[in-house]
Image (spheres, helix red, strand yellow):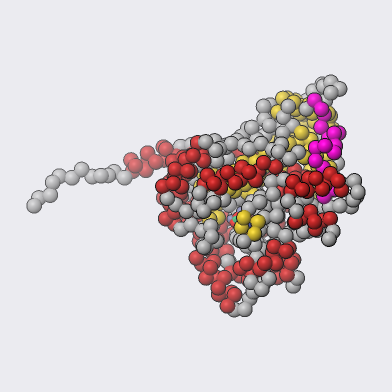
Amino acid sequence: MSMASLLRIIPSPLILLLISITISASESHPMQGICSVECDTELTSSSGKILIKQGTVVNAHHKVLADVYIEDGIIVSVRPNIAVGDDVKVIDATGKYVMPGGIDPHTHLEMDFMGTGTIDDFYTGQAAALAGGTTMHIDFVIPINGNLSAGFASYVHKAKKSVMDYGFHMAITKWDEAVSKEMELMVKENGINSFKFFMAYKGALMINDELLLHGLEKCKSLGALAMVHAENGDAVAEGQKRIFDLGITGPEGHALSRPPVLEGEATARAIRLASFINAPLYVVHVMSIDAMEEIAKARKSGQRVIGEPVVSGLTLDESGLWDSDFTTAAKYVMSPPIRRTGHDKALQDALATGILQLVGTDHCTFNSTQKAFGYGDFRKIPNGVNGIEERMHLVWETMVESGKISVTDYVRITSTECAKIFNIYPRKGAILEGSDADIIVLNPNASFRISAISHHSRSDTNVYEGKTGKGKVEVTISGGRVVWEEGNLKITSGSGKYIKMPPFSYLFDGIDKADAAYLASLRSPVHRTGAAY
Ligand code: URP
Ligand code: ZN
Ligand code: ZN
């Protein structure tokens, strides 16, 4: 068995050990760039002081030519011509962009799903993220048998090996008084300010409208953001049966069984229910024109709806699902499905014009052996694709290099907007004095090439295989440590921090006033004179 295959099936603590033994022996190893903290002392100054010189510092609101000085994980100063002593590591960023590290709002590391587990854990997934310029992600805690505290404890354990900062959303999969109480605990004690409701995956994670209404009410009262996976799960189950009974058993059946209309319907329903409750709503992985147009309509009417496209939806089309090779076709299976060409461009335009607000990945990776569980029955192919390492490069290529958006907007959609929505701005999502030193240096004149041979995910496939473009993240600084430079990763298991996210983000400002206006508009109860019988 090759070392690459071995690394994909063994647990990550063993990988750490193995990597430090094998790294010098195998120059062409796909993970040769990863080293644990013991094997390299050059990437960060021992004093924890870093100066990034003469780059264009980009924030969502402004860009300026300046130096950035970092001490002990915090940005101390942003201004031109900062003079420093010999104990400071200096990074020359002349001709390059210095930007906040990416924040990925949507990942699934080490998640139990569809009878298996995602192949990237909090070590390999975050290693991949850092190599691609993402310095924080928000993962979805899945309750255990509906129990939120048990789910939270399990994710706290999984995240112990973290190498960068992370936060948690939490899924709600059943409803009773205990769940309602635990939501309170999660928000007030555990730093969770968002809850996800799956309107699909019937018989597993799916909830019904009654639960969604309870959830929206509860979220609103706690100042937590309700998120939805919007597909009509009942109709999907019917669609799957219909397509399978037609003898279509391969990966293309996945797309055929859950068409855009089912995503549009569920998106519209969730939006209307959120409007009925007057609660803000976040729609995850917007994959179709149908869903995007529902969001556009709602936002135009003044409703607080956030739409999150993901890199796969923005840059791929469904043609891969028709590939004659099963392994190739199966790697594209995710839900909602990657759509026909045309949806991708429409989502890009919606992102460029502010109809959609931020980009996630839904990084939920399974290797080809796991995908093969669904050989002969597309319903059993574990749903999910990679993206945590590729997002920053592909968004740059698709949106900035193409001239669709500015560099400041790039920072907004990859980092700042996420920090604002989840209420951690300006600690994250900004290069300001006092912000966390999570920073990337991107060279707009260098180029990237994506391949499973060189990526840092544990998966043996990559849905962006062969994609190339301009704009390369050359340096990643995470918590004031240089963790990615000259193609080398220097990461330390356990160095990542859990970022608590407080409730009542800007999306809740004025909700109380709108509620008061609604109550006043009722002109009820009417005080009537007594009946005349
Ligand atoms: O196919 C997907 N999206 N897998 C991850 C779970 C989800 O629906 O977000
Ligand atoms: Zn989903
Ligand atoms: Zn997801």
Indicate left or right for 76 with 447 as reference.
left
Q: How many marks?
A: 0
Residue ID at (63%, 53%): 111
Q: Quadrant of residue 467?
A: bottom right
Q: Position of residue 325 (x, y in %)?
A: 75, 70
Q: Which residue is most to the left?
A: 533
Which residue corresponds to the image point at 85% horizontal and 34% vertical from the top-left? 41
State the image coordinates of residue 227 (x, y, percent, origin top left).
53, 49
Task: Say which residue appears at 80% left-offset and 45% top-offset.
Answer: 17
Q: Quadrant of ligand 1?
A: bottom right
Q: Is residue 331 above or below residue 145?
A: below
The spot of residue 511 in percent (x, y) is 44, 39
Residue 176's spot in the image, x, y percent? Answer: 42, 50
Image quarter for residue 527?
top left
Look at the image and say whether residue 40 sits in the magenta stretch.
yes
* Residue 79 seen in the current view: yes
Q: From the viewer's perspective, is 294 left or right of 166?
A: left
In magenta, the rendered stretch is: 31-47
Give the answer, above or below, for where 325 lies relative to 93: below
Residue nearer the viewer, 211 or 527:
211
Residue 264 in magenta stretch: no
The foreground one among 180 and 420 is 180
Nearest the viewer among 433 and 152 is 152
Instruction: Name the quadrant of the N terminus.
Output: bottom right
Relative to 481, 354 lies left or right: left
User: Mostly what secondary structure, the magenta segment?
Assistant: loop
At a point 74% along the width and 67% down the height, the residue shown is: 327
Residue 396: tell me if it is visible.
no
Indicate whether 75 appears above or below 362. Answer: above
